[in-house]
Amino acid sequence: MNKIILSACLLILVATAAVAQPPKAWKRYTVKGEAFSVVFPTFPAMATTEEFINRFEKFRRQRLLGAYADGLVYTASCYLNPKQELLEDFIEQEIFTHSTFDRTSEKDLKRNGFNGKQYVAPDKVPGTVQFFSTGNSIYRFEVFGAGLDDSRVKQYFSSIVLGKSASGIEVTDGFGVPYESGPITQTDWSTQKPIVGKQAERTTIVIMKPEPMYTEEARNKGITGTVVLKVAFFSDGSVGKISTIADLPYGLTEKAIEAARKIKFIPAVKDGRFVSMWMQLEYNFNLY
């Protein structure tokens, strides 16, 4: 009888462990010319932009990769570092002036011979970020939606490989592939009418919002201003209908819509489940 009970307990433990483990379908991805690779639950969206950095008085290339799956958002950011900025200085400028990561949670990291730092977000939505410098580039890896004790979060961070030998499926700029969830019919929920923010227990949380690129024609004509969009963020993590509230000519509205399609977010919550929600977004176009 004891053996039967023990066997049953073991079966329960195995079943529980199987549920807790990240999906085996995750694959390893990289970007041509970059010195990293990491796993994602699905083919990630990617956006490459040129961002003007005031402290450098010049533009810097930035690449953002992101994927959503079952309530978690995974991102990898690549920053060109031609002036060999120290990792600590980069973190001070890019993180502690714009976000709420806890300084006291700092942890030193080492990966493939490269030094790094880790910080944890104390907000109601748990998040963890890791930074590494390879000299010519600085890499930032984040997961939002679960803490470090979650097996999926552990898998993501433990999969990071740095160095020129890092390999994987090559990602280029694009919208990525939506994640197909398990037996829970998340996609059924995305067909329901999106709610507005005041109806949600927790509103949509945008994690990755790539900036749109100028078109050459708009730049040559000196066009500046703001594109305002109304966007439906579906409960399955996909971006739905987009309508234009305020537009700009010469392809800038189209560029803003393209950027919005690459957004990665944690869906809104109502009555204990993910729901679709409308949000208004603004994209500012300025010439330097």
Image: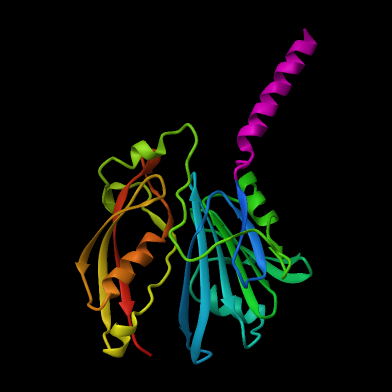
Residue at left offset 35%, top offset 65%: 258
Residue 127, placed above or below residue 9: below
* Image quadrant occupied by the N terminus: top right
> How far from the left and from the top, in percent, is residue 224?
27, 84
Q: Position of residue 19 (x, y in %)?
A: 61, 33
The quadrant holding residue 190 is top left
Give the quarter of the figure containing the C terminus.
Answer: bottom left
Q: Is residue 52 above or below residue 192?
A: below
The image shows residue 76 at horizontal and vertical percentages of 57, 63
Above or below: residue 205 compared with residue 249: above
The residue at 50%/69% (across/down) is: 99
Residue placed farthest to the top in the image? 1
Can residue 170 be seen?
A: yes
Is 17 or 46 nearer to us in this picture? Answer: 46
Q: Is 118 in the magenta?
A: no
Colour scheme:
rainbow
In the rendered view, would you say 23 is above or below 267? Answer: above
Residue found at the far bottom of this picture: 57
The image position of residue 179, as x and y in percent, is: 48, 46
Q: Majority secondary structure of the magenta segment?
A: helix
Which residue occupies the foreground of this view, 167 or 128?
Answer: 167
Residue 73 is left or right of residue 153, and the answer is left
Residues in magenta, as a range:
1-25
Name the residue: 53% across, 90% down.
56
- Residue nearest the viewer, comparing 48 with 131: 48
Q: Is residue 92 left or right of residue 8?
A: left
| Horizontal side of residue 74 vs 162, given as left or right | left
Q: Nearer the viewer, residue 144 or 76?
A: 76
